[in-house]
Image (cartoon, rainbow, N blue to C red):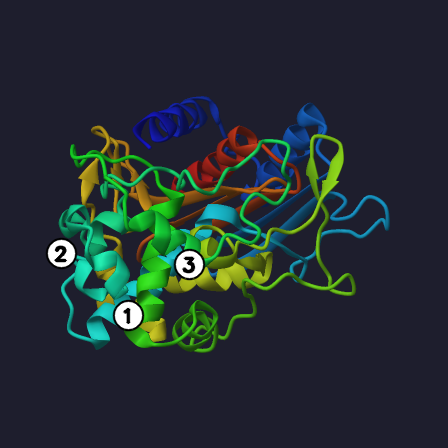
Amino acid sequence: MKKQLVCTLMILCVAFTKAQVNTSDSSIEFIKRKIDSVFEQNKLPGLFVSVISNGQQHYFSKGYANPDTKLLFDSATFFEIGSITKTFTAFVLQKVLDENKIADTASIISYLPDSVKTNTALQKISFLSLLNHTSGLPRLPDNMQVKFDNRAPYDNYTAAQLFSWLKNCRPAPDGKSNYSNLGAGLAGVLAELIAKKSYTRLLEEHIFRPFKMIGGTEVFSKEENKSQGFFNDQKTAYWNMDVLAPAGGIKCSGKEMLRYLQYMARPEEAGNKKIIDNLLLPTVAINQTMHVCKAWHTFELPGKPVIYWHNGGTFGFSTFAAFIKGEDKAVMVVINKFSENKVADGLGVAIMKLLIQ
């Protein structure tokens, strides 16, 4: 994870250094021009940006959500948010832990199936370590057999396979922060086991319904207002992530994601101040300017407000989300193409820089 975050940090630093705003222009005009430039320079199929500035929502669209049907992106167009899902999972797990009076520093081993509890190497893994990527678990379990040419790498990986792998795994002992989709997926599975409810139901009860959002992990039908993702020039299907859906399986729209970010920034509006304050506490330092909280990352430069952010990627989408705590300032960027996170991150940070000036 450290290598990945340092790479992203370099993007963030460059974006903060280079993104200059002509103060004679309005913020909206600057954002429009920036989006136009990014779209043209990178030859993207589609680009959609959602922004909250001073309590006002703004939406910007370029290209197509689906080039074949000429479907344009709008605020209700669904897409895969990728690893931003991990922030939803952190919220759900923390909610379940609080309801059951379980400390986030407690070992997970007592809450796993009996067949897995025999692996005493799991004793050192806490709930917190799953959320800040210090569990020592690898990025993915080696019985998953991911192939790069497989456009649906998580398909049909079941809870039984996950528990079978956990029975004999040996987490790395160093406690360093190493990005783990497996760890985030397991966090969601543990929430299910403790609450005795499905991840889908937990999302509905703790986030979608109280936040008045629409979204989920299911694969939508062709009739839905959804964008088409691309792997290079090839169309890709939406991922069915099965048991690891808590690591990256949520599909949502720009409008719904802005609602989510607004509640993260101002948790008192949803009656969740205590839990969200907890989620946003830095737990691991990557370097002087970046920390890992519970799923969320922070980025801070001298004299600037802390930016809370997470990005995501599937084989069809690249995404970036960020907000400022206590302020009506947030951005959500989606590109319907694989491996464009450098572009999405850079654009998102350039907009955040404008918002905090």
Confirm or deny contact between disc 1 and disc 3 (CB under 8 A): no
Q: Residues within 10 Å of mark 2 (few under 14, many from 20)?
A: few
Discs 1/2, front: 2
What's the residue at 48%, 51% (across, down)?
Answer: 248
**288 shown above or below 238:** above
| SS at mark 3 in the image | helix
- Left/right placement of residue 168 relative to residue 23 reads left
Sequence-first tag of 1 and 2: 1
What's the residue at 16%, 68% (across, down)?
Answer: 102
Residue 105's tag is 2
What's the residue at 21%, 71% (across, down)?
Answer: 98
Nearest the camera: 3 or 266?
Answer: 3
Amino acid residing under circle 2? Thr
Q: Residues within 10 Å of mark 3 (few under 14, many from 20)?
A: few
Question: Can you identify the residue that label 1 sits on?
Answer: 95
Question: Can you identify the residue that label 3 sits on?
Answer: 160
Q: Is residue 295 visible?
A: no
Q: Is residue 186 visible?
A: yes
Amino acid residing under circle 1? Lys
Sequence-first tag of 2 and 3: 2
| SS at mark 2 in the image | loop
What's the residue at 42%, 58% (across, down)?
Answer: 160
Q: Quadrant of residue 190?
A: bottom left
Confirm or deny contact between disc 1 and disc 2 (CB under 8 A): no
Amino acid residing under circle 3? Ala
Q: Quadrant of residue 179?
A: top left
Q: Quadrant of residue 194?
A: bottom left
Residue 125 at what x, y percent from top left?
A: 19, 49
| SS at mark 1 in the image | helix
Residue 168 at what x, y percent from top left?
A: 27, 45
Sequence-first tag of 1 and 3: 1
Quick one: quadrant of the C terminus?
Answer: top left
